Image (cartoon, rainbow, N blue to C red):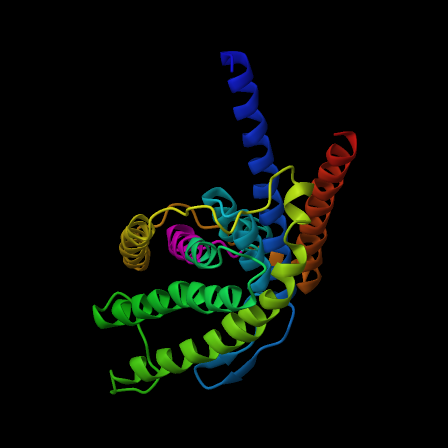
Amino acid sequence: MSAVSQALSKQNIQSKITMAFILMLALSGLENLVAEIIPELEIGPLEIGISSFFFVPLVLAILFNNWWVALAAPIGELIFADLVLGEFGGLGEFEEVLLFTIGLMVAAYIARDPKNVKQVLIAGLIGYLVIELPATLIDITKVAIGVEEFEAVEGLPASIVAVESIDFLIEYLITGVIFGAIPAMWLAPRLYGKLEPLMGMKPRDPQEKPQTASTLWGIGVAGTIVAGLIAVLSEMGFNLVEWEPEFLDSIGEWWIWVGIALAAVVAGIILFIANRNKSNS
């Protein structure tokens, strides 16, 4: 293969990954915004509600099995949910970016065969555990070292562990299981072999040798440690840029529909372009 052919082939692969990246970006932002408009039930310091339709990025991560596509999920929430709604908290936001990306790639590693319902279920359960458990431990650590205040039960420091543990279980059950692993079991086998060709990619080969587990877990541990440091620095005031414009408060809650429409339009454009390219080829 000539140098020109290799360059064109590499460029073609990059363009396909870019389209998958933008699709994940838009759909992840869309599902987060839809979850945002569903009311939460508050019981004391606990909030019971849907924080995310986790099955959407989970299925896409399993199908595409690409670090860039996995990274697009938390970035999509930052762009379409946090920035559009004026809720960007600065440096601390990147804690979730790291943990979410690692969790999705762990899930993609486990579910090597998207048609295997059992693999998809285990991938969803472990993937969300990798996301949520370190986040809970980081929150407890921030209170323990004194960089974040917590007043669930005054004079009882141990209450932070109880409240965070209960919150973790609720979040894991609702988002990770009910709106994560279970719907993904149904959706992943049905989209396998249909969505990837639309993006110009080959479906995953279940027999293909994956990256070594030691490499993935090494990246995961390192990323979790960095996420913890970022969270602590953020609470100590070392933020980059915060985006909380006051004018959005005067607009009203209808502004969220602007973000939903924007994310839906971007996803629609990507799917339209992909379908057109598939028809032309």
- At x 25% / y 69%, what residue is drawn? 141
- Coordinates of residue 217 in the picture (x, y in percent): 31, 54
User: Which quadrant, please, contains the C terminus?
Assistant: top right
- View extreme (front): residue: 207
- Residue 266 seen in the current view: yes
Say which residue appears at 65% left-offset and 40% top-offset: 199
Disc count in the image? 0
Q: In this rendering, would 217 be left or right of 25?
A: left
Report x, y in % for residue 37. Answer: 65, 68
**67 with respect to 84 (left or right):** left
- Residue 123 shown in magenta: no
In x, y percent, where is residue 97?
43, 52
Q: Is residue 128 left or right of residue 198?
A: left
By secondary structure, the bulk of the magenta-drawn segment is best described as helix
Quarter of the image for residue 11 reads top right
Q: Depth check: 242 or 63 in front?
A: 63
Residue 92 inside the magenta-drawn segment: yes
- Residue 247 seen from this side: no
Q: Quadrant of residue 225?
A: bottom left
In the depicted structure, whether residue 227 falls above or below residue 265: below
Give the side of residue 227 with respect to residue 52, left or right.
left
- Magenta residues span 87-103
Q: Position of residue 221 (x, y in %)?
A: 28, 55
What residue occupies the far left of the structure in this picture? Answer: 145
Residue 182, placed above or below residue 92? below
Q: Is residue 192 above or below residue 166?
A: above
